[in-house]
Amino acid sequence: MRILLTNDDGYNAPGIQVLYQALKSQTKHDISIAAPEGQRSATGHSITLFAPLFVTEHALEGSGKGFSISGTPSDCVKLAVQGGLIPKPDLLISGINQGANLGTDIFYSGTVSAAMEGVLLGIPSLALSLANFEYKDFGPSAAYLVEHLDLLLKLRHKGLININFPGKPRTEWRGLKVTRLGKAIYENVFEQRQDPRGRIYFWQSGNLVQDCESDTDLTAIQNDFVSLTPMHSDLTDFACLQTWKELFN
């Protein structure tokens, strides 16, 4: 099977490199990488239309190919697959991201957007995130993915599976929960500052409001479970669809 790895933390980020080594050493799949040349977090599903995309090829073991690309995570997937850098993969894995991608944060996430780009191109995709910015050991998350990869493939899910791992040693994980997306609502703060030339600028930050609903990905991670959320690309509000058809037609 051909697997394409991507991310939004950059080609040399430890998350994607640890995942590559785990897959390469413990499976027989053909692994390639197409990832941004540097940090591209929170770029959402943006693509580059008014600038060139520069590509640097990197040597990888076996028949796989590695590319660092000057664009966004979605650019990397589109260019790799539609630009002919690699044969169309059977599976796309985005991550392992440093930091959680939970709830409505997925709309801003370059990690999840890269995986969703795979879905739009007809490729089953996984988005993987380590839900902690301070915890740096990606080994347990990579090992867990490798151990459960065959089971995930047997699901034959043609959309996106968003997986978040607790940011702590695996001995402290409490298991896995299949979840829905929670509501990641922030109390945003915009700190106003002034540069030496007198120009006003702002730094954005915020605190996440606690999600107390029991079946969400946010609650699962708060309780030290791996969260697994099936997603698809169709944002249609089906609850309104038939009613509105009758009203407007």
Image (cartoon, rainbow, N blue to C red):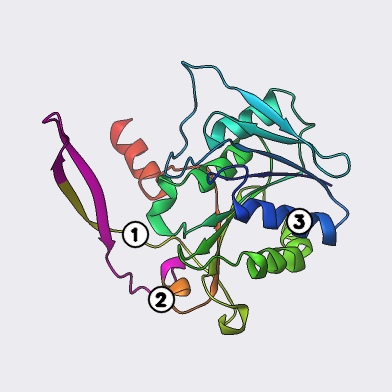
Q: Which residue is mark 3?
A: 21
Q: Secondary structure at mark 1?
A: loop
Query: Residue at 30% of width from left, 70% of height from top?
Result: 210
Can you give x and y, in whole percent of width and height, for residue 42 in the image? 42, 44
Which of pointers 2 and 3 lies earlier in the amino acid sequence? 3
For residue 231, above or below residue 172: above
Q: Secondary structure at mark 2?
A: loop
Residue 214 is tagged as 2
Q: Which residues are magenta?
A: 192-218
Whether the magenta-drawn stretch holds residue 223 is answered as no
Report the residue that reaches farthest toward the front.
196
For residue 57, above or below residue 165: above
Query: Tag 3: Cα neighbours inside 10 Å, few (<14), some, or many (≥20)?
Result: some
Question: Which is in the foreground here, disc 2 or disc 3?
Answer: 3
Query: Residue at 64% of width from left, 51% of height from top?
Result: 16
Q: Amino acid at mark 2?
A: Ser
Q: Nearer the viewer, residue 195 or 67?
A: 195
Whether the magenta-drawn stretch holds residue 197 is answered as yes
Can you give x and y, in whole percent of width and height, for residue 46 in the image? 46, 32
Mark 1 touching mark 2, by CB under 8 A?
A: no
Can you give x and y, in whole percent of width and height, for residue 130 in the image? 54, 63
Please give left or right for residue 87 compared with residue 83 in the image: right
Q: Amino acid at mark 3?
A: Gln
Q: Nearer the viewer, residue 182 or 1?
A: 1
Which of pointers 1 and 3 lies earlier in the amino acid sequence? 3
Distance from the alpha carbon under mark 1 to that under mark 3: 32 Å
Q: Which residue is mark 1?
A: 184
